[in-house]
Amino acid sequence: MNLGHIRRMSIPLLMVACLATDALAQKSGGTLRRASDENPPSASLHEEGSNIVTTPFVPVFNNLVTFDSSRSVSKPDQLVPDLATSWTWSADRKTLTFKLRRGVKWHDGKPFTAADVKCTWDAVSGNKDAGWRKNPRKSWYANLREIVVEGEDQVSFRLGRPQPSFLGFFAAGWSVVYPCHVDGRQMRQKPIGTGPFMVKSIESGKMIRLVKNPNYFKAGRPYLDGIDMPIISSPSTRNLAFVAGDTDIYTPSASLLAEVKAKVPDAICEVGLSYAYTQLMINRNVAPFKDLRVRRAFALAIDRQAVIKVKGAGLDRLGGELMPPPEGSWGLDTKDLASIPGYSGDLEKRREEARKLMREAGYGPDKPLNFVLSTRDVARYRDTSVLILDHLAKIYAKGEMKMIDTAIWTNILAKRGYAVAVRSRGQAIDDPDVSFYESYVCDARGNYDGYCNKDVEALIEKQSAMADQNERKKLVKEIDRKLQMDVVRPTITFAALPYCRRPYVKGYVPSLNNQYSNLRMEDVWLDK
């Protein structure tokens, strides 16, 4: 299978393959092996923001609702029950009520009830101290006014105004239900859930082991006895582990995909445009980056096509803040991007314009702008940062790279302890509210560069309440364009992610537009 064919694989073809797999007789037993590329900062999903936490620990939990894991594209209109059996909206669209499953047990044997749901989202919304150190998705729930428990099996969320996207929040990989009786410290170290797998052990820097939950509420699930996740920080070592047969599932970088296919020709690899995108962070609170001329010069200097070619093996794509079509429902398309500085036109002409802006701001060949570019100390960040430093050097900007350990990376950004940074971020669902409220309203925790525009914030609030999704899409594009024109956090590329597995791994359907979905692994089995 050549790379071009992998990229053009149609969703109907994938669905046919999935149906064929489901028709086979599933086998119980065996341990799935998949490497984790970094040591998780903790095991607490509600306190973290990276797929190095969701991948190992989503299987421990359940959501109220979830995306249909038999589908390769995660869409908010394809929600299925999980801990909730059904849900209804009130006539005024301001109260969302969930009916819950009865008889579900936490891994420690205690019963799951509506009180656990209330405890979880009282903590997420900031109305309860659960002993968490961080709460990155608090801003999602700014519109939540009250959570009402109605017996052990019903809970209602009351909103301040209609918000059509609110239901979709509960399907995100991060939106798992926590037990009311377990404190934050234990959830960071050895979490308790209701999910198909339980935490057996976490050896920092070495191995995460999950074992089958024998009392899982979904009959016959999971098929696997467990999941072993060795922590292998080196990309080349992870590659060797898959080639040698030491792991069963592997997500290589796009640049390594050809090598994987050459060395493991029977590997099944599917490539999707993930909702993971690389941005150039520019701290506008630090001189001289308050100056729009300097920020715009930086945006003009970036050779995005070079990043796509070198880092993304030609498979990455261009976009704004939101995932571009056709995979994304809300993002800027090629025509929209053409009018934004840095996305189109002759590269050398763009850089000459950038040099002019830099000269106007007081810089030149004899007086370069010296700056430090911070980046997370992992290969995909470092590789992109090297390219960006080279691009910026061509417009009188002389940068030095500073590598930050993953354990403190988010805190560095949150405290705005950087001047310029390269970071990759992911979105939990394809909906503007997730991105805008998490990162672009003035007081959002994820607003790492201090951007605050009350006019844009009013537009964000307006689009969130709109019932007409076509009109909402027009306004969302207007907001995205404003963010790009003001060079808030210029998007460099959206990453193409290959998902490779051994042919004996069955029932695994990766989400090809969202790296945080289809991670529960309860339907996966080994045909050995």
Image: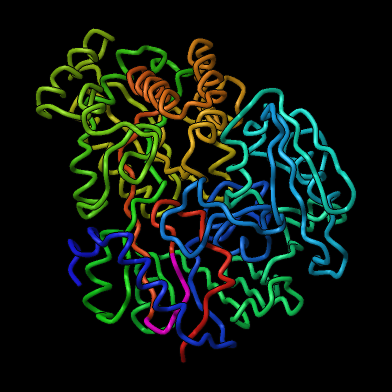
Q: What stretch is highlighted in magenta?
A: 503-509
Q: Which residue is drawn at 31% across and 17% down?
A: 294
Front-most of 137 and 280? 137
**Residue 348 in view here:** yes
Q: Residue at x 51, y 25 (%)?
A: 440
Residue 97's quadrant in the figure?
A: top right
In the picture as drawn, the residue positioned furthest to the front comes out as 91
Quadrant of the image containing the N terminus: bottom left
Please state the horizontal and vertical placement of residue 352, each as a whole percent of the image. 13, 20
Please state the horizontal and vertical placement of residue 206, each as a whole percent of the image. 57, 71
As drawn, 503 above or below 380: below
As drawn, 482 above or below 78: above
As drawn, 490 above or below 229: above
Front-most of 289 and 472? 472
Front-most of 260 and 394? 260
Please state the horizontal and vertical placement of residue 286, each as a whole percent of the image. 46, 19
Relative side of 97 to 25, left or right: right
